[in-house]
Image (cartoon, rainbow, N blue to C red):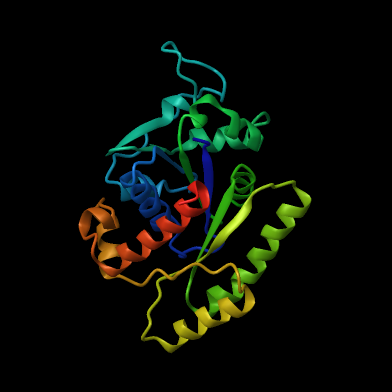
Amino acid sequence: MKTTIICIAGLQPGAGATTTAVSLAHGLSLHGRRVLLTDLAPNNRCTAMLGLAPEPESTGLRTDDMDAQGNTALTSGIRFSRRHGLHLLSGRRPAEMILSDRGCPDTFRQHPSIMAWQVILINTSPAWADLQERAIQASDLAIIPTATDPASIDGLAQGMHRLGMLQERKDWHGNLLGILPTFYDAHAPEHVAAVQTLHERFPKSVLPVIHRSVLLETCTAAGWTIFETDPLVRAAKDYLALIRIVRRITEGK
C-alpha cells in the first residue's frame, strides 16, 4: 500500500491541531493502519498527549549519518507509542532533517523508514512557519483545523491564501483534504454563525465539525486518547467520522 503523508497544519495557535493529530493517528491505527505520528511542534505536545516520557536529547546525527548500530538520525528517533500500529517521531531530529541544507521535502518522502508506514501524520505549529511550509510540501494532503470563533475564521482566510500561494509557487503537488472546525458548541450562536461563514467562504472544503468536549481536554492532559477514554462520547464519534473521510480518500473506502 502506498504511503500517504498528511499534514495537520494549524495556521493559528489554539486550533486543536495537536489533539486532531493524536486522535486521528490513534484512530487510524485502531483501524489496522501502520501509522507514524511525526511531531514538529516546538513543545512536543504529541509526546505528552500519548503519555510518553519526554524525547531524549538528540544524538547529533545528520539525516543520513549512522550510529554504531546502523541507525540514522531519523530511525533512531522513532518510538513505540504503546498502542498497536502507532509509532511516534518527535524532538529535534525530524525538524533538523527537513530544515537541513540537504533536507528538502523529497528527502523526507523518499527515506526508507518513511516508506515503511501506511500513513504518516505530521503535526505542525504556526510558531515555526518555515518548518510548517516544508512539512506541507512533503505531504500528499493537508488538514487545516480552525477554532469556531469569529476571530479564528477571519484569520483563516489569510492562511488559506498562503496555502494557495505555496501550491502555485513552490510546486506542492498535494491537495487540501479539508478545513476542520474544532471546539464547536451548537448552543453558541457565534459558533453556528462562524461555521456558516466557513461554508460560504470555502463551500467545498469544510469537514464535519469537532464538538467541544471537556472529556477531550482532560483525557489528552492525562496521556490518553479519546478512544481510550470513552469511544462513545460525541467528540470520539466526530473524530471517527473524520477517520472515515480520510480512509475513503486515501484507500477508496
Q: Is residue 168 above or below residue 70?
A: below
Instruction: Locate residue 75 relative to residue 165 in the image: left or right.
Output: left
Residue at 61% across, 80% down: 200
Is residue 127 visible in this depiction of the protein?
no
Instruction: Locate residue 58 relative to residue 172 in the image: left or right.
Output: left
The answer to which quarter of the image holds residue 127 is: bottom right
Q: What residue occupies the far right of the structure in this picture?
A: 169
Residues 22 and 130: in front is: 22
Q: What residue occupies the far top of the structure in this picture?
A: 68
Residue at 39% across, 53% down: 24
Q: For the image shown, how many numbered marks are present on the structure? A: 0
Is residue 77 visible in this depiction of the protein?
yes
Residue 241 is situated, as x and y percent measured from the top left of the image, at: 39, 62
Q: Is residue 246 above or below residue 37?
A: below
Q: Is residue 195 above or below residue 19?
A: below
Q: What residue occupies the far front of the structure in this picture?
A: 253
Q: What residue occupies the far bottom of the structure in this picture?
A: 189
Residue at 62% across, 31% down: 107
Residue at 37% across, 61% down: 239
Residue 120 is situated, as x and y percent measured from the top left of the image, at: 48, 41
Residue 163 is situated, as x and y percent measured from the top left of the image, at: 67, 58
Residue 86 is situated, as x and y percent measured from the top left of the image, at: 35, 39
